[in-house]
Image (cartoon, rainbow, N blue to C red):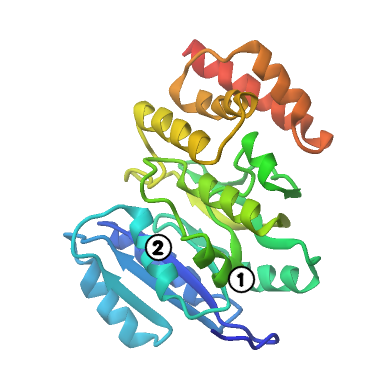
Amino acid sequence: MVENISNPLITVYIPTYNRRDLLERAARSVLDQTYKNIELIIVDDRSSDDTIEFLETLSIEDKRVRYFKNTVNSGACVSRNRAISAAKGEFITGLDDDDYFSNFRLEGFLRAWRIANINVVALYSNVCRKTQRGVKKASPRLNFCRYKDLVYSNWPGNQVFTKVIFLKSIGGFDTDLPAWQDLDCWYRLLKETKGEAHGIDDYSYILDVSHPHERISQKGNDKLEQAWEIFCNKNFLTDNEKNISRLMLANYSGFRPDFYYLLKKITGMPRWKNFRHALILVYLSFSVVKK
């Protein structure tokens, strides 16, 4: 493990499956970072296209690239955990193969880490959404959160910047979950380290929803319900926390939210300045129901 404080090695992992064109963009966005001391680990989940040929060429072109190929198609979280296990960096963050980084993302994280307080165990950023209409900034995320705050929303989103040793200590992502793996991972990370995750004020992650491929995070309603139930039970959520966390399913499954728990969510949202965010979630919940 690299312990050079001035120039630490940062591991970036990308799980991929049959999206060679999008993967190239993602990989290039990592290799073109302004911060250069990185290793890029790409795990191919047994693609049937020319992904492996591309990875062979890329690893020859840039020695910072390592890649693995799963013997059977096993899902994104198995691939992520394989990369985490192989990581040699002091710090680590992830990237989905259909998304990409702004070139200052890793430098921004490292600068923020150096001035963060001792309670910080993870960082996250705001995101831009790329649609058919172009790239637009999404609503800013919570400025910091603890594990209890994640019952209300997955504030960090799908990626965080943290130490490799932290992710390894919690066993990485839970491969038994059919969805919500990122939320569960951040929840356990913050709970077990008794730490905080802080947001940095940039929009260095571009989440692409404009392409025709299915996103890694897209799941059916049954799988989302199942994931919610597993998440609640394994993390010993109270009945109140279970009902509040279930409201996160409303945007996907279209069930009618319970007004009592909507009210509890609004009044219990971490940091009152996010009251507006709570109201937006309520609006989205009911708008999905009406469709």
Kindly identify which residue carries mark 2: 81
Depth check: give the residue in front, 197 or 136: 197
Q: Is residue 268 visible?
A: yes
Q: Are marks 1 and 2 in contact (CB under 8 Å)?
A: no
Sequence-wise first label, 1 or 2: 2
Given residues 1 and 249, the one toward you in this image is: 1
**Disc 2 marks which amino acid?**
Asn
> In the image, what residue occupies the spot 54% across and 26% down?
246
Q: Secondary structure at mark 2?
A: helix
In the rendering, which numbered label is found on residue 167? none
Query: For this view, does 130 lie left or right of residue 214?
Result: right
- Of residues 86 and 143, the one drawn nearer to the viewer in this rendering: 86
- Please name which of the two marks, 1 or 2, marks the residue nearer to the observer: 2
190 w.r.t. 230: above or below: below
The residue pinned by badge 1 equals 106
Point 41% across, 71% down: residue: 85
Q: Can you say whether 199 is above or below 286 in the image?
A: below
13 to the left or right of 240: left
Decide: few, some or many residues near mark 2? Use Cα within 10 Å; few <14, some 14-19, many ≥20.
many
Query: Looking at the picture, how far across and down is residue 266, in whole percent?
Result: 73, 24
Coordinates of residue 237 in the picture (x, y in percent): 59, 34
Can you tell which quarter of the image residue 271 is in?
top right
Q: Residue at x 56, y 71 (%)?
A: 165
Distance between the Cα atoms at labels 1 and 2? 21 Å
